[in-house]
Image (cartoon, rainbow, N blue to C red):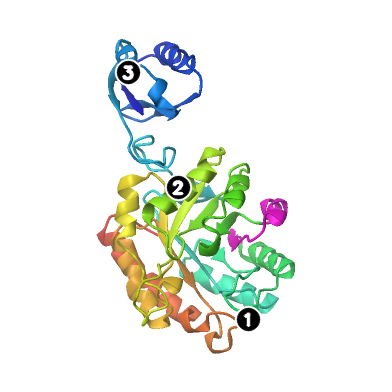
Amino acid sequence: MIIVLRKDTTQKEIDQLTNAITATGGITVNPVYGADITILGLIGDTSRVDGTRIESFHCVDRIMHVAEPYKKANRMFHPEDTVVDVAGVPVGGRRLAVMAGPCSVESREQITGVAQAVQRSGAAILRGGAFKPRTSPYAFQGLKYEGLELLKQAREATGLPIVTELMSTADIDRFVEDVDCIQVGARNMQNFDLLRQLGRIDKPILLKRGMSATVEEWLMSAEYILAEGNEKVILCERGIRTFETYTRNTLDLSAVPVVKRLSHLPVIVDPSHGTGKRWMVDPMAKAAVAVGADGVMIEVHNDPQHALCDGQQSVTPEQFDGIMKDIRAIAAAVGREL
């Protein structure tokens, strides 16, 4: 349930209304103060709320019922777009956030060299996998804690914030200390225990869409984090599993405007995992910006032919530089900037 207040409502009136609502028990009231409108979002068993009594308060303009199961992620509860700060880099708003780097951290020379290259081209955040969830138990699983240390060294050399994937709740404290943005991978999108614990920390969370998840399921996963108090959630469309086998996944660019309509959370696109093909990264990155994404995440490797993970979808630093030039042109055309 959402209560829309009149423009001239005072804080005293808001407090009085809030006390009247919470007195029934089991209801949490979340006020949202916008530039032109103030609303109260009610979370809990709203069937116990007497709508006619609420409407009797002079400050109430109207009551709206929310059908969607996600509340805190819902744009109706939060009309203005959320901008998540990642160590000084805004994700959301007018400026696009570009995250770039290798699929997996392989050596100090590799990650630092790639970090310096993508920074020169305009990337704002360094991505790199230290822990790698792989379909095969025999595939390269990442350098793990050594990889985290190498990411930190690359951050020190460039100043770029780092985003990397967390796989276990046991490592949350380490990631909070070492990482600027914690990524939840597609396979863990519905690891609800992990999501709940990430909701109790003060750190940006990049939540990738599950391989077969609907938009509602994706937003409900974000709700787990938001419900625990962490409002720094970034959504990432990375392709879903369909009957098509030519590409690694089917990049669902329609999800971007859908999420923008339903939710206030920023959403970025990963065209590397979304297609699995190097030559498709450029056109899909441009398309992502055109449909309203708040940024892109691109895999960049200095030697894709010898990459230990996902070399077929990684672009070289030179190719990435060309992609950035193309993205700038599209961004300008749709009123955004890098």
Please say whether residue 174 is one of the residues in the magenta stretch. Answer: yes
Q: Mark 1 to mark 3: distance in Å?
A: 58 Å
Q: Mark 2 to mark 3: distance in Å?
A: 26 Å
Rendering coords of residue 81 (x, y %): 38, 43
Rendering coords of residue 159 (x, y %): 61, 60
Task: Give SS at disc 3.
Answer: helix
Judge from the rendering whether residue 117 lies leftward or rightward of residue 7; answer left or right.
Answer: right
The magenta-colored residue range is: 159-178
The amino acid type, in three-letter code, at marker 2 is Met
**Residue that mark 1 sits on:** 139
Could one spot residue 8 in this view of the protein? no
The amino acid type, in three-letter code, at marker 1 is Ala
Could you tell which of marks 2 and 3 lies nearer the N-terminus?
A: 3
Quadrant (top left, top right, bottom left, bottom right) of the C terminus: bottom left
Q: Are marks 1 and 3 in contact (CB under 8 Å)?
A: no
The disc placed on residue 51 is: 3
Q: Are marks 1 and 2 in contact (CB under 8 Å)?
A: no
The disc placed on residue 220 is: 2
The disc placed on residue 154 is: none
Rendering coords of residue 218 (x, y %): 43, 53
Task: Give SS at disc 2.
Answer: helix
121 up-or-down from 257: above or below: below
The amino acid type, in three-letter code, at marker 3 is Gly
